[in-house]
Amino acid sequence: MGKYRFRAIGMLIAITCASCGDWLYLIALNLKVYEQAEQTAAAVAILYMIKPAAGLLMNSWAGSIIDRLDNRKLMITLHLIRIVGLIGMIMADSLWQIYVLVFFVAAAGSIFEPASLPYITGLIKERHWQKFNSYRAIADGSGFVIGPAAAGILVGAGSVEAALTVNILLLLLAAVICFVLPSVKVALEEKAESKWLQIWKEDWRLVFDYSKSFAMLTFLLLLFSCFTVMTASVDSMEVAFAAEAIGLSEASYGLLVSIAGVGFISGSVLLTVVTRYFRSVQLLTYGASAGAMGYVLFAFSQSFIPASAGVFILSGALAFANAGYVTYMQERIPVEQMGRMLSMYQSIEAVLIIGMTAVLAGINQLTSVAAAVQIGCLIMLMLAILLGMCSLKANVKTKA
């Protein structure tokens, strides 16, 4: 039991390091691109389109590899690839070079998520999944607070390059921890005569057949994916909205992000206390509904105080929603298929994110950033209501 707890804690520390680095990288890069592009919201929106574009390119086939390789070794490799990309980003001196390197880093990141979930599912005992995911929310929330705060300090006192260097060190630490942790599953065997294209087609057929057999499960997961799409699309306008619609300075925006981080941690801590009283689907739907209301409050804010209340609520609620979503998948998708299922669902999600981000950017150009954010948040609220209605009526089958 002592060794098991050590492994769980080690995984949480690795997640905290990666989360902190991701937020530090995201905030610093947003500010750098926004300034370098002469405060053009569309330039920042492109950053938010690069990640789903990379996901679309990688996830359509990456799942076939994820379920056939040692996930721990793959996670270490992906951490190292991201480190190399960040080193290149430090040396980049033009906006387009940054975009190319962001794509490179995002491609590795898009594979990492569906690779890490099967590994964690195997590492953690089934009865502890929901509890672990609640503590994982705290780990993510710690990065949410520390990352932006560190980015503000490093960018203010030094440069974006200093922030990226710290990110490299955090990813290196996460890679070392993964190296110490054990492998937890055996790679699937393939027939010698199997062709890669044939394997890829069979994997897509497997995902389709499973999704058809568990239609309500698939529908609920896709609904939540649409909700996630809207959060990503609205977030792409966040910097410009805070500056133009609310009139916040960079310092005030940094404080707003920190408040969101505090909200996420507060929600995560509350989640660890109450998680045993809820099923995973309840965490998912209640969290999505409260998160959507927080987004709407933020979208219609005209000053710092209501905006900060909105981000506090939405962040705390999303801790519940994300933990519920991950546990829900772990309970119902076989671990030996999880990489393929998650990767291919994320391919669909990537297409939707690119489309909705482009739509909101177009609305921004035609009207205002405030109108774009408000429309996005109202759509998000409708999706949350639909998700709640469907979850109440659903009689979802258990894992095959």
Image (cartoon, rainbow, N blue to C red):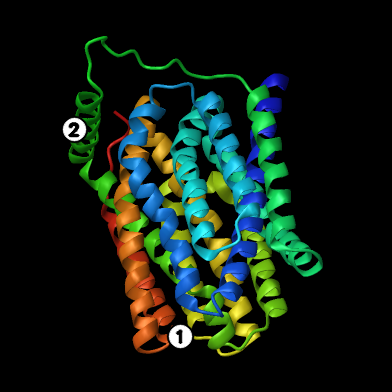
Looking at marks 2 and 1 on the same chain, the residue that comes earlier in the sequence is marked by 2
What amino acid does circle 1 point to? Ala
Seen at 43% across and 57% down, the residue is 50
Give the residue at mark 1. 370
Q: Which residue is mark 2?
A: 205
Q: Locate residue 306: give its quadrant.
A: bottom right
Mark 2, Cα crowd under 10 Å, few <14 / some 14-19 / many 20+, is: few
How many marks on residues? 2
Residue positioned 28% across, 43% down in the render? 396
Query: Which residue corresponds to the image point at 28% horizontal and 57% vertical from the top-left?
Result: 390
Q: Helix, strand, or loop for circle 2?
A: helix
Badge 1 marks a residue whose secondary structure is helix
Eyeballing the image, is 249 above or below 331? below
Indicate the position of residue 347 as horizontal and vertical percent values.
Answer: 32, 47
Image coords of residue 71 (percent x, y): 49, 26
Vertical side of 145 occupied by 199: above or below: above
- In the rendered image, which quarter contains the N terminus? top right
**Residue 265, placed above or below residue 204:** below
